[in-house]
Amino acid sequence: MFRRCNGLRLDGFSKINGPGSHILISASNDVVVTNLRIVAPGDSPNTDAIDISSSTTVQIRNSFIATGDDCVAISAGSSNIDVSGVTCGPGHGISIGSLGGGGYDVVENVRVRNCTLKGTLTGVRIKTMQGGKGYARKISFEGIKFEAVDNPIQIEQFYCPLKVNCQNYTSAVAISDVSFTAISGTSVAENVISLSCSQSVACNNIKLDRVYISPSTPGNKVYSTCFNARGQATHTKPAVNCLRR
C-alpha cells in the first residue's frame, strides 16, 4: 500500500499474480501512475489492480491490466482522478465504489477516457450500497471502447456483494452530474445500459451522448433499463427512453 505518499510516481513496471489487490493508493496527493502491466488470472477473487481511496489529483495512464476483479476502483474520499489509455480485460472493469458501506462517502471530479475493455464482467460503473450517505458527482466516461463486455454501462445503487441482508433503506449516496460520451462497442449481455438508482434518492443529471452498443452475437437484441434516474440521452443506441426529465 502507498499511504500518504504525496508526489508519488510509478512508471514502467509489471506486477504478476498478486494474492490480493495489487496497487493501493490511499491518503495521497499528486500521484501519477503510467505504463504499468498488471496481470492475474481472470478467476482470481479480490485481485483489484489499482485501488484509489481518500486521495486527490491522481492520474492513471497508458497501462495494461488483466485481473480477476476491478481493473481500477475509485473509492471513498477521492477527487480529481483522471484515468486514460487503460486496456482492461479480463476483469470487472473500471468502477466508482463501492460507496455507502462506511457511512458518509464522497467521490467527485472523476474523468475516465480513451480506455478499452475486452471481455470484462462489467464495463464502466458506479456502485453504491443501500443505507449509506454522501455523494458521487461530476463523473465522466468518454471515448470508451467495449469488446464482448458483459454489463457495459451500469449505475447500481443496490450493490450487495455478500447477497445477504440486502435491504432497501431510505438513505443512499446521491449520484449526480454523470456523463457517458462517445462510447461504442459490443456486449455479450442484452441489458447493455442499466441505470438502477435508489428509490428514495434519484440519480440526477445523467447524460448519454453518442453511445452505440451492439450485440457481440449478430441477431441478438440489446436494450436499456432505468429506475429513478433523471437526465437525457441523445444519439444513443439502444435508446434510453426510460430516463426521466
Image (cartoon, rainbow, N blue to C red):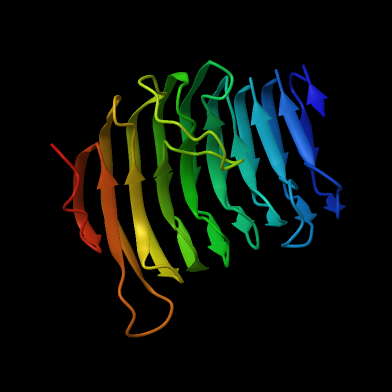
Quadrant in the picture for the N terminus? top right
Closest to the observer: 100 or 66?
100
- 232 vs 26, left or right, is left
On screen, 134 above or below 20?
above
The location of residue 184, given as percent across then percent down, is 38, 63
Q: Which residue is painted at 45% across and 56% down in the image? A: 144
Residue with the most extreme left position: 245
On screen, 236 above or below 107?
below
Can residue 117 be seen by looking at this rendering?
Answer: yes
- 142 vs 34, left or right, is left
Can residue 143 be seen by looking at this rendering?
Answer: no
- 59 vs 245, left or right, is right
- 25 vs 59, left or right, is right
The location of residue 29, given as percent across then percent down, is 67, 19
Which quadrant of the view contains residue 109? Answer: top left
Q: Which residue is painted at 28% across and 53% down in the image? A: 225
Quadrant in the picture for the C terminus? top left
Q: Which residue is painted at 85% across and 51% down in the image? A: 15
The location of residue 64, given as percent across then percent down, is 69, 57
Which quadrant of the view contains residue 97? Answer: top right
Residue with the most extreme front position: 165
How many numbered discs, if any? 0
The location of residue 112, given as percent across then percent down, is 49, 43
Residue with the most extreme bottom position: 219
